[in-house]
Image (spheres, coloured by chain):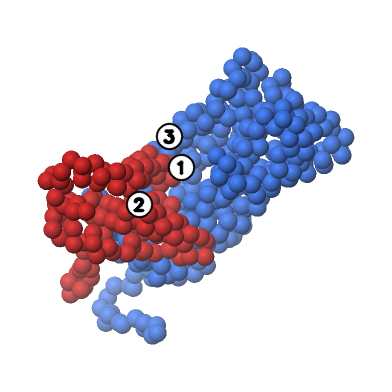
Chain colours: A blue, B red
C-alpha cells in the first residue's frame, strides 16, 4: 500500500492543491469555510479543472476517429475481403490488416483508453484524500496541500446531514442521510451513463460503425457499467460520489454538444443538423474531421445513353 | 528443466517445476481474467495489434514471468498519442519454438489468435 501511495503522491498533491485553492476562493467570496457545501463546490471545481484540461485530448480523439476518409476505400476493400467470415481467427486477421492500414496512413482511431487512463490516477488520488481524512484528522495530520486544520474541517463537514467522508458500506449505513444521498447519486451516475451511451449509439454512429463487431461489446458495456457503478458506489465516500456524478454529467453534456454541433458524418445526428440548417436557410458547414471535397468523390451522374463511351483510363497520380 | 516430458518427471521434480512456473501461471490466470471480464467493458480501444493485454499474455506465456512482464511494460510505454500504433508482435523465443515443434498440440490459443493467417488478396483474380 505504501508503494501505491508513493506513486500517487504527486497526483494526491495536485488534487488536494486544486481542492484547497477552490476552497480558499469560495471562502474569500464569503462562504462559510467549514460548511459542507463549500467543500462540495471545491470537489466540483476539481472535476471542472480536470475535464477542461482533457478537452484537447477528446478533440484529438474525435479528429482521429473521423479523419479517416482518406482510407475509407481501403477499409471498404478490407471489409469486402472478410465479408461473411465471422469466425474469431478471421476477425483477428482482419484486425491485424486494419491496424497495418492505420499505421500506413499515419492515423489511428483507437486512443480511447488514454482519456480513461489519464483520469484514473486523479480518481485514485481523490479517493486517497477522501478516504484518509478520518484517520488523518484523528492523527492531526495534513494530506498533500491540505493542512491538518483543513483536513479536520473537511472531515467534520456535512451536506444534508451526511459527512463527506462517510460511505454506505463502511460505517455510513446507520445514517439515513448517507443512505439516501449515496443511492440518489448512484442512480444519477447510472442514468447519466446510460443516456450518454444510448445517445452515442442511437444518434452519433455511422451505418458502418453500427455494423462493426465492436458494437456487441459496446452493447454489453451499456448493461455492465451500471453494475460497476452500483458496486463501486456503495463502497465509496460521499465526496468521491460527488466527483464521479459530476464527471458523468460533464460527459453527458459534452456528448450532447458534440451530437448537436459536430455529429459524426453519415450518422442520424448529422442528417438532423443538416435539416435544421436547411430550415433556417443556412448552408451546411463541413463537419469536424470531414473532407470538404466529399461531394466530388461521389460517382458522376451516368452519361446519357446512346453512343457507347470508350472506357478511359483515369489519370493516376504518380508518386 | 524438460517441460515436454512432464508426466515422466519424478514427484520432487514435478513440485519444483510447479513452484518454478507458479509466478508465470498466476500472471497468465490474471491476464486471462482481465481479458474475459474487464476488456469487454471498453471494447476495442488499443492502437496496436495484438492489443496490450493479448501482447502481455503471449509475452508471459512465451518468455516467462520476468522477461514477459518487461516486454509488456515496454509495450504499455509505447502507447501514447504520438504513436500511430499498428502491428506490433511479441518477439519470438527460440526455446519456446523448439518446444512447440516437438509437440505442436500444446500450442496455446493466444498464440493462434495473435498470429492469424492473413488470407491472400484475391484482388488480382477478381479484376481479371
Q: Residue at x 74, y 37 (%)?
A: A142
Comparing A101 with B18, the one in front is B18
How many numbered dots are placed on residues in this image?
Answer: 3
* Quadrant in the picture for the C terminus of chain B: bottom left
Query: Is the residue marked by circle 3 packed among few (<14), some (14-19), or many (20+) residues within 10 Å?
Result: few
Query: Is the residue marked by circle 1 packed among few (<14), some (14-19), or many (20+) residues within 10 Å?
Result: few
Residue that extends furthest to the front in the rendered view of this protein: B12
* Quadrant of res A135: top right
Checking the image for residue A54, the label placed there is none
Residue A68: image x %, image y %? 45, 63
| Distance between the alpha carbons at the discs numbered 1 and 3 | 18 Å
Q: Are marks 2 and 1 in contact (CB under 8 Å)?
A: no
| Distance between the alpha carbons at the discs numbered 2 and 3 | 31 Å
Comparing A182 with A132, the one in front is A132
Marked residue nearer the N-terminal end (1 or 3): 1
Q: Which residue is mark 2?
A: B65
Checking the image for residue A202, the label placed there is 1
Q: Is residue A94 above or below residue A116?
A: below
- Marks 2/3 same chain: no
Q: Which residue is mark 3?
A: A224
The mark closer to the camera, 1 or 3, is 3
Q: Residue at x 57, y 54 (%)?
A: A58
* A4 sits to left or right of B67: right
Q: Is residue A54 above or below residue A150?
A: below
* A37 sits to left or right of A65: right
Residue A168: image x %, image y %? 58, 22
Q: Residue at x 28, y 56 (%)?
A: B62
Residue that extends furthest to the bottom in the rendered view of this protein: A318
* Quadrant of res B38: top left
Q: Residue at x 28, y 64 (%)?
A: B92
Q: Is residue B102 above or below residue A181?
A: below
Amino acid at each position: 500500500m505504501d508503494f501505491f501511495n508513493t506513486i500517487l503522491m504527486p497526483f494526491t498533491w495536485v488534487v488536494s492543491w486544486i481542492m484547497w485553492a477552490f476552497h480558499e476562493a469560495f471562502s474569500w467570496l464569503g462562504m462559510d469555510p467549514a460548511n459542507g457545501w463549500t467543500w462540495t463546490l471545491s470537489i466540483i471545481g476539481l472535476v471542472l479543472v480536470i475535464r477542461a484540461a482533457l478537452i484537447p485530448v477528446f478533440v484529438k480523439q474525435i479528429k482521429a476517429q473521423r479523419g479517416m476518409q482518406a482510407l475509407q476505400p481501403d477499409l471498404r476493400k478490407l471489409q469486402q475481403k472478410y465479408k461473411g467470415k465471422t469466425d474469431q481467427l478471421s476477425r483477428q486477421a482482419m484486425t491485424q490488416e486494419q491496424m497495418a492500414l492505420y499505421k500506413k496512413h499515419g492515423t489511428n482511431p483507437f486512443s480511447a483508453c488514454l482519456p480513461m487512463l489519464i483520469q484514473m490516477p486523479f480518481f485514485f488520488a481523490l479517493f486517497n484524500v477522501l478516504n484518509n481524512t478520518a484517520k488523518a484528522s484523528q492523527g492531526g495530520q495534513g494530506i498533500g496541500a491540505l493542512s491538518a486544520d483543513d483536513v479536520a474541517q473537511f472531515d467534520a463537514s456535512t451536506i444534508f446531514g451526511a459527512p463527506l467522508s462517510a460511505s454506505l458500506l463502511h460505517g455510513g449505513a446507520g445514517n439515513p442521510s448517507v443512505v439516501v444521498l449515496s443511492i440518489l447519486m448512484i442512480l444519477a451516475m447510472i442514468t447519466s451513463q446510460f443516456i450518454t451511451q444510448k445517445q452515442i449509439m442511437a444518434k452519433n454512429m455511422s451505418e458502418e460503425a453500427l455494423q462493426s463487431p465492436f458494437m456487441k461489446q459496446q452493447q454489453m458495456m451499456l448493461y455492465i457499467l451500471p453494475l460497476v457503478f452500483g458496486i463501486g458506489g456503495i463502497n465509496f465516500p460521499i465526496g468521491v460520489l460527488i466527483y464521479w456524478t459530476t464527471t458523468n454529467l460533464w460527459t453527458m453534456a459534452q456528448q450532447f454538444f458534440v451530437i448537436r454541433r459536430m455529429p459524426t458524418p453519415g450518422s442520424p445526428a448529422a442528417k438532423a443538423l443538416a435539416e435544421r440548417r436547411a430550415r433556417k436557410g443556412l448552408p451546411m458547414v463541413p463537419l469536424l474531421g470531414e473532407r470538404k471535397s466529399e461531394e466530388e468523390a461521389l460517382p458522376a451522374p451516368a452519361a446519357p445513353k446512346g453512343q457507347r463511351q470508350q472506357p478511359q483510363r483515369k489519370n493516376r497520380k504518380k508518386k | 528443466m524438460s517441460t515436454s516430458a512432464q508426466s515422466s518427471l519424478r514427484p520432487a521434480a514435478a513440485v519444483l517445476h510447479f513452484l518454478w512456473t507458479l509466478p508465470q501461471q498466476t500472471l497468465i490466470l490474471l491476464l486471462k481474467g482481465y481479458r474475459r471480464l474487464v476488456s469487454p467493458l471498453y471494447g476495442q480501444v488499443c492502437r496496436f495489434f495484438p492489443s496490450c493485454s493479448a501482447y502481455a499474455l503471449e509475452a508471459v506465456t512465451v518468455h516467462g514471468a520476468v522477461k514477459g512482464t518487461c516486454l509488456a511494460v515496454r509495450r504499455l510505454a509505447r502507447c501514447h498519442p504520438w504513436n500511430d500504433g499498428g502491428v506490433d508482435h511479441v518477439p519470438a523465443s527460440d526455446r519456446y519454438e523448439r518446444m512447440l515443434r516437438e509437440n505442436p498440440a500444446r500450442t496455446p490459443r493466444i498464440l493462434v489468435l495473435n498470429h492469424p493467417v492473413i488470407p491472400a488478396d484475391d484482388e488480382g483474380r477478381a479484376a481479371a
